[in-house]
């Protein structure tokens, strides 16, 4: 998310009745210029999204994957078969749709995860107690977000969020969560940003969630009075900063992902926390960039 800092001064009705009534129709979820966002429609498009993920996570970020993944040049796992895959496509590129895919997000709804053996994030964070405290709410996991380098612009990110928002409305989602990553496997290298998140955005009460005990790495690496907020904000990865601007919270403790060479934190975003200015920008019916 690269839009300006958002606030919550506007009051918007986000009741489930309102959200379901505003559900978008099938097809494109948004369009800006030649860029379009929609869900993958075929196995070939999912395969193409996995190829984009391989380029970003393995070739660019040097993630460690199995030999078969290197042979196929695809980032893939067992969750791909049960998730929905949000795509950004550049329709100005001639050829098959899978050749147009320039960005992707993986979306996993709670009811699907329960049938498939759980959420991806449970390998790092204790998600089940969080969900158990909200029996009447529907959760959605966001993951595997990536965009090809030449398309890392404001409009591409806006379209990804347009797609996420439209999808959440479509399925009456009450809360989103997912891992946000810092580069590298040494949390202390991100002491300023991690400590800022710990002291200012920690999820509490019914929304509290923590890293799995055996993987827990403290985020409390600096005292609150030693943190320069402006410098801390500048040190946050864009995706985490974007979640924060929407009204997200973070779980307690970080996890080092050695395979992907990242330090992960859990982002928790109740729909009721999303700032009114953000909802007004994209539209309560996700209609701002709809086609």
Image (spheres, rainbow, N blue to C red):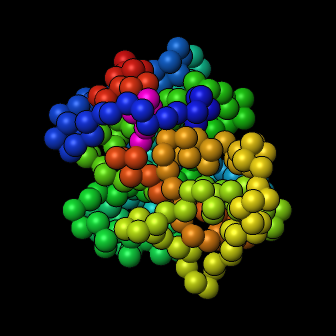
Q: Position of residue 73 (x, y in %)?
A: 67, 52
Residue 113 image-quadrant placement: bottom left
Q: Nearer the viewer, residue 109 or 60?
A: 109
| 151 versus 249 height, above or below | above
Residue 38 picture quarter: top left
Q: Residue at x 40, y 47 (%)?
A: 273
Magenta stretch: give its range: 274-279
> Is residue 137 within the magenta segment?
no
Would residue 126 appear left or right of 279 to someone viewing this image? right
Q: Is residue 76 visible?
A: no
Q: Residue furthest top?
A: 33
Q: Of all residues shown, which one is farthest toward the front?
A: 225
Q: Residue at x 56, y 46 (%)?
A: 244
Residue at point 75%, 66% (across, down): 223
What is the tally of numbered marks visible in this picture?
0
Residue 215 against residue 221 in the figure, above or below = below
Of residues 100 and 217, which is closer to you in this image?
A: 217
């Amino acid at each position: 998310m690269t839009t300006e800092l958002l606030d919550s001064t506007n009051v918007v009705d986000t009741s489930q009745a309102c959200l379901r009534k505003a559900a978008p129709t099938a097809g494109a979820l948004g369009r800006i210029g030649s860029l379009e966002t929609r869900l993958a429609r075929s196995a070939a498009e999912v395969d193409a999204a996995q190829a984009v993920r391989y380029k970003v996570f393995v070739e660019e970020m040097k993630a460690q994957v199995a030999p078969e993944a290197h042979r196929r040049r695809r980032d893939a796992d067992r969750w791909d078969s049960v998730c929905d895959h949000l795509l950004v496509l550049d329709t100005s590129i001639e050829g098959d749709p899978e050749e147009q895919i320039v960005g992707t997000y993986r979306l996993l709804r709670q009811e699907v995860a329960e049938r498939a053996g759980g959420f991806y994030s449970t390998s790092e964070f204790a998600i089940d107690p969080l969900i158990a405290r909200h029996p009447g709410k529907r959760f959605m996991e966001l993951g595997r977000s990536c965009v090809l380098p030449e398309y890392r612009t404001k409009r591409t990110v806006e379209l990804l969020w347009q797609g996420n928002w439209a999808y959440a409305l479509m399925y009456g989602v009450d809360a989103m969560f997912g891992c946000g990553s810092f580069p590298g496997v040494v949390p202390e290298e991100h002491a300023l940003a991690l400590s800022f998140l710990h002291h200012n955005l920690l999820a509490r009460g019914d929304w509290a969630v923590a890293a799995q005990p055996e993987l827990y790495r403290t985020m409390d690496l600096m005292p609150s009075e030693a943190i320069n907020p402006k410098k801390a904000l500048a040190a946050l990865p864009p995706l985490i900063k974007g979640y924060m601007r929407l009204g997200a919270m973070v779980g307690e403790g970080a996890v080092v992902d050695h395979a992907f060479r990242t330090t992960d934190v859990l982002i928790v975003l109740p729909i009721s926390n999303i700032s009114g200015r953000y909802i007004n920008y994209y539209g309560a019916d996700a209609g701002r960039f709809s086609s």
